Amino acid sequence: MAARTPQPVSAYLVLLILGFLPLILVALFYDDLPHRFVVQWSGAGLSITGTRAKSALTIAIACAAIALFAVVVAVVQNDAFKASGIRRLFLALNFAQIVTIGLTCVMLVGEAVGCPFRAREVVPPSAALLLLIAALLCLRLYAGAAAGGRIVFGAAALIFLAAAAAIMALTAAFIATPLSWLGIGVALLAGLLLALPESSS
């Protein structure tokens, strides 16, 4: 019987902590958030409007749920992910997703309470990193896919790469603060490191 691959428990714990921190943050400052109609989503001709406080809480709850779901999937598929060389990218993708959502919550709460930290300047680079990791994951899946799957994963990788490049370019052009440049640099460095092949042994 083959030995099972060890679970990266510490990574799971960090992911869960980061996933639930936005929920704690929003809950603590919920009464400080303005309860007025400022956030709108439009789709299929229907406009849905929510209050800023409720919107922030919804985002925070989604962040915690995503973290929990990601850990469950990672635990169940640990051996398969490790064997196919995508475990690191899967975890990194979810870390980037959680950090991006968390920074969005920090931005909403920080602007409401007058925090000097400008979280909105690092949200776009974080989103760009998320797309970059998604592109790397698609490229890794592309390498082991059949002919039909290669077309799908290859096209998805190109779309994600183009979107990440566009976000970084727009951030550099329209935000262009030291904090945003730092965010872009961190995103590029992280992308380069994650592009290195993962050992399946």
Image (cartoon, grey):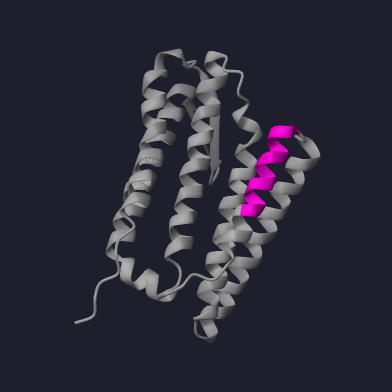
Along the line of sight, which residue is nearer the eye, 1 or 16? Answer: 1
Residue 197 point in image, percent of width and height: 54, 71
Question: Would you say 127 lies left or right of 18 here?
Answer: right
Q: Quadrant of residue 133?
A: bottom right
Front in this rendered view, residue 115 or 52: 115
Q: Quadrant of the C terminus?
A: bottom left
Taking the spot 53% from the left edge, 34% from the top edge, the residue there is 104
User: Residue placed at 34% from the left, 50% from the top?
Assistant: 10
Total numbered circles: 0
Give left or right: position of 30 versus 144: left
Q: Magenta part of the protein: which range?
A: 177-189
Q: Quadrant of the rendered structure where residue 88 is?
A: bottom left
From the top left corner, tell me how far across and down residue 162 is, in percent: 69, 59
Outermost residue, right side: 173
Q: Residue 184's x, y, as percent? A: 68, 45
Which secondary structure type mostly characterizes the magenta part of the structure? helix
Residue 15 sits above or below residue 194 on the image: above
Return the residue found at the far bottom: 147
176 falls in the magenta region: no
Residue for point 54% across, 86% down: 147
Q: Quadrant of the N terminus?
A: bottom left
Say whether residue 183 is magenta: yes
Query: Residue 141: x and y, percent?
Result: 50, 74
